Image: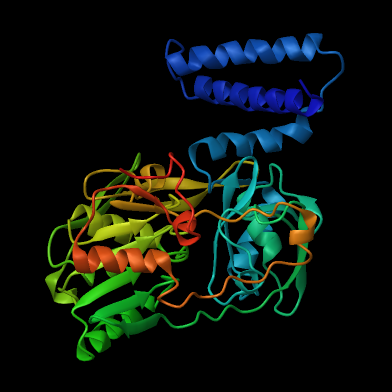
Amino acid sequence: MSRHFKSLILGVSTCLAALLLVGAVLDKPSADAPYRHLAVLTEVLHRIKSDYVEEPDLKSVTLGAINGLLQSVDPFASYLNADQYKEYVKQKDTAQGDVGLVLSWKYGYLGVVGTVPGSPAARAGLVTGDMIETIRGISTRDMPLAYAELLLRGKPGTTVELSVLSLRQQEPRTLVLTREVLQIPPLGWKLLPEQVGYLQVRSLLPGKVGQAAQALRELQKQGASRLVLDLRNCATGAPEEGVALANLFLESGLIAYLQGQRVSRQDFKADPAKTVWRLPMVVITNRGTAGAAEVAAAALLENKRAEVVGEPTYGNAAVRKAVNLDDGGAIILAVAKYYSPTGKAIQDARVTPSVQVIEYEPVPESEEEQPGPLEPEKEARPEEDLLLQKAIEVLTKGKPAERTVAWREAAAGAQPSPKAAGP
């Protein structure tokens, strides 16, 4: 066992021991099972402190352990010490430049959930699943998520250096991104053959639902009788924006509900006065669909309003708040989650498409295949977008038997692997 790993265990034990003391102060019953486990960990801590080969540095690992505890319940949670929290609050209250990354914890490092369309991160080719190894030369191992976001923001025109790990390259690559005031591009929409309307939603920041409603009206004027709602890589926007988006397509029924340990259940029901599109539709999702877009996709699927085609979504739909601590720091964590109409916590269960289509990312086999920085992914033409074609097939010909389609293999003319092939 490595020294780092032992230190990490020690830090976790310290935090859990602290929780045990807090429980005692709050007069929690010592017979409760969780506190019996904490008592065992307290004893383990004592043995490590007294018997380990050298005096451990508790302070340096405790901060990482605190974040580890938070991440075990919420991959978007953070602990900030007093100085970090002061800077965090100050920065949130001022206009800042940003690079447009949406991050969460993954495998002990910061993973990319998605990018803001048109942002420096998007233009640099960062995609869902990439790992951020360092920010400004600082390792993201055990770095609080909120602190990482703080490091990424700054005065427009200034730069920030990242080291990025990607499945598409064998070695880490260094990116220097210039911060800017993010300008979100308008939604994309067009009329495809066979009277199929296409609406691409890459962001659900404020104002986008109104744009979607206007686009839907224009598509109907142009003769669209069916719709593909493309929510791929839509990872920005508050969950309530997803409720509003779903209401454009639902006349009745439960869209979602919000509930937490100390937050009473709040139901969000469809208002027929806000419905714009009542014709057939299909939704497309992928692993970069997160937050508000997941709320909308779950509502449309579980109300039997639309089939969902594509990949399972990311899993992030919650209300988070900063809880102040006595030392001046704070923890930022989910205090309530959004649930689908059938009662699934979207953050935990994600949204599983009714027709699953897995997109395999190509992995370079040698250094020669990756001579320089990656180029941003270009938009495929409709006839080349096989996932869009699958959605149109479902929309025009009816849903096929549920199956997983290895469409990258199919496009290459190869036989799908047994794991990916359907019946």
Locate residue 183: give its quadrant: bottom right
User: In this rendering, does residue 240 appear at all?
Assistant: no
Residue under the point 27% across and 48% down: 402
Q: Could you tell me residue 377's position as x and y percent?
A: 58, 70
Q: Could you tell me residue 150's position as x and y percent?
A: 66, 60
In the rendered image, the quadrant that contains the N terminus is top right
State how the image is colored.
rainbow
Residue under the point 46% across and 20% down: 27
Tell whether 52 sits left or right of 102: right
User: In this rendering, does residue 185 appear at all?
Assistant: yes
Q: Could you tell me residue 19's position as x and y percent?
A: 56, 26
Q: Could you tell me residue 336's position as x and y percent?
A: 37, 47
Q: Is residue 154 above or below residue 172?
A: below
Numbered label tally: 0
Tell whether 94 sits left or right of 235: right
Q: Nearer the viewer, residue 249 or 62?
A: 249
Q: Nearer the viewer, residue 90 or 357?
A: 357
Residue under the point 22% across and 61% down: 306
Residue under the point 74% across and 67% down: 373
In the rendered image, the quadrant that contains the C terminus is top left
Given the current orientation, which residue lies at the most extreme right position?
54
Locate residue 342: give its quadrant: top left
Q: Nearer the viewer, residue 336 or 134?
A: 134
